[in-house]
Image (tube, rainbow, N blue to C red):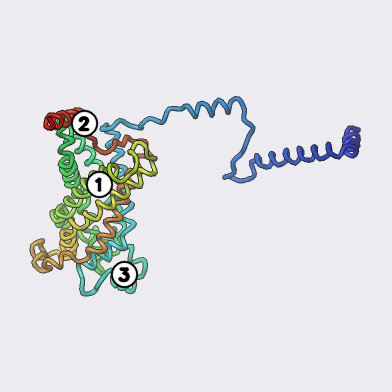
Amino acid sequence: MKCRRRVAACQEFPLLHRIIDIKMFSSLLETARNSPFRGPLSQVSCEPTIASEQGAMAAATAVPQEDSCEFGSPKYFALCGLGGILSCGITHTAVVPLDLVKCRLQVDPEKYKNVVNGFKVSVREEGMRGLAKGWAPTFIGYSMQGLCKFGFYEVFKVLYSGMLDEESAYSYRTGVYLAASASAEFIADIALSPLEAAKVRIQTMPGFASTLREAWPKMVQNEGYGTFYKGLVPLWGRQIPYTMMKFACFEKTLELLYKYVVPKPRDQCTKGEQLVVTFAAGYIAGVFCAIVSHPADTVVSKLNQDKTATAGSIISKLGWAGVWKGLGPRIVMIGTLTALQWFIYDAVKVWLRMPRPPPAEMPESMRKRLEAEEAAKSK
C-alpha cells in the first residue's frame, strides 16, 4: 500500500521522483565506497563522528615522537652498529660484480685489459653467475666491518670529544673525526681480514674454490689460520686512510653544504631533504676515499693472490703506475658505495628514531669571545 502511494506521488510530482532517485543513488554509491570487498588498498570514507573529530584534534596537537634512546648511551651505540651492518653489508654485496672485475684487473692486467673487457672475459668464461663469485665472504665480512666501523666510530668520537673542553672540541673537531675513525677501522679490519682473504682467493684464483664453504677449509688445511691475517697490515694501510677520509671528509662536507649550499637551516629541512644532503656529502667523500686508498688496495689483492709475495716485492714489481691500475672503476664503485652507506646509515637512524645531532656549530662562549676580540682590535 505504501509503495503504491509512493509511486503515485512520484508520478504526480516528477521533481520529487528525481530527488528520490538521486538520494537512492548517492546512498548506494556511499555504501559501495565503504564496502570491505573493494580491495585492500581502498580508503574508506566515513561521516565524521564526535570521536573521530576528537581523535583528529588530538593528532593535530600531538607532541612529536621522542627519541628511542639517549645520545651516547649503550643502546645508541648498539643501534649505530646495526646501521653499520646494514649500510656496509648491503652496499658491498650489491657491487660484487664490479669488485670482482676490479680485483682481476689488479692481479692480471694482461688478461683483463679494462673494465669492459674484464666483464666480457669473466662472462665468457664463467657465465653471468660467475660475476657473483665471492658474494658470501663479502656480505659477512663487510657486515662485521660495518658493525665495528660505525659503532666504534661513534664511541670514539664521543670519548675523544669528552677529553677536550667545549671550545677545543669544536676547534679540533677534524682531528677528533680522524682519530675516532682510525681507531674504529683498526678494530674493524681485524674482523674483515679473514673474509677478505677468502673473497680474493675465490675471485682471482680460477679453480681454487667457488664458495666460501669450499674456500675456508681448503685455506686452513693448506696454509693454516695465519693465512687469513697475512694481508692485515696492508689492509690497515688501505682501510685506515680510506676510513679517515670517509668520516672526516663527510663530516666536513656536510657542514659546508648546510652552510653554503642548502638554502635553509638543517632543522627546517624535511627528513627526506636531509637524506639527500647526506647522500651528496657521502659521494664527495667517496671519491677522495678511492684515490687515497687505491695503491694499498692493489697490494692487498696481489698479496692474497700470491702467497709467496710481500708488500715490498709487489710494489717494486708493479711500479708507481702499476699500483694505480683499476682506479677508474674503484672511484665509481667507492663513490657510489660511500654515498649509499651514509644514506642507509642515516636512514636507519631516522627509522629507529635515534638522536641525530646537527653538524658542529661554534659554541656560544667562543663566538662571544671572538666578537669581543674583534671589537677590541677595531678600536
Amino acid type of the residue tagged 2 in the rendering: Pro
375 on left or right of 331: left
Q: Which of disc 1 and disc 2 is earlier in sequence?
A: 1
Disc 3 to disc 2, C-alpha distance: 53 Å
Name the residue beneath numbered marker 1: 253
Choose top left, top right, bottom left or bottom right for residue 64.
top left
| Percent x, y of residue 363 | 21, 31
Instruction: Give the secondary structure at mark 2.
Output: loop
Name the residue beneath numbered marker 2: 363
57 on left or right of 196: right
Few, some or many C-alpha atoms within 10 Å of disc 2 (few <14, some 14-19, many ≥20)? some
Residue 285's place in the image compared with 215, above or below, is above
Few, some or many C-alpha atoms within 10 Å of disc 1 (few <14, some 14-19, many ≥20)? many
84 on left or right of 188: right
Instruction: Give the secondary structure at mark 3.
Output: helix
- Choose between 18 and 318: the one closer to the eye: 18
Disc 2 to disc 1, C-alpha distance: 20 Å
The label shown at residue 119 is 3
| Percent x, y of residue 69 | 33, 31
Disc 3 to disc 1, C-alpha distance: 34 Å
Residues at marks 3 and 2 touching, judged by CB atoms closer than 8 Å: no
Few, some or many C-alpha atoms within 10 Å of disc 3 (few <14, some 14-19, many ≥20)? some
Image quadrant in which the C terminus is located? top left
Residues at marks 2 and 1 touching, judged by CB atoms closer than 8 Å: no
| Percent x, y of residue 323 | 15, 64
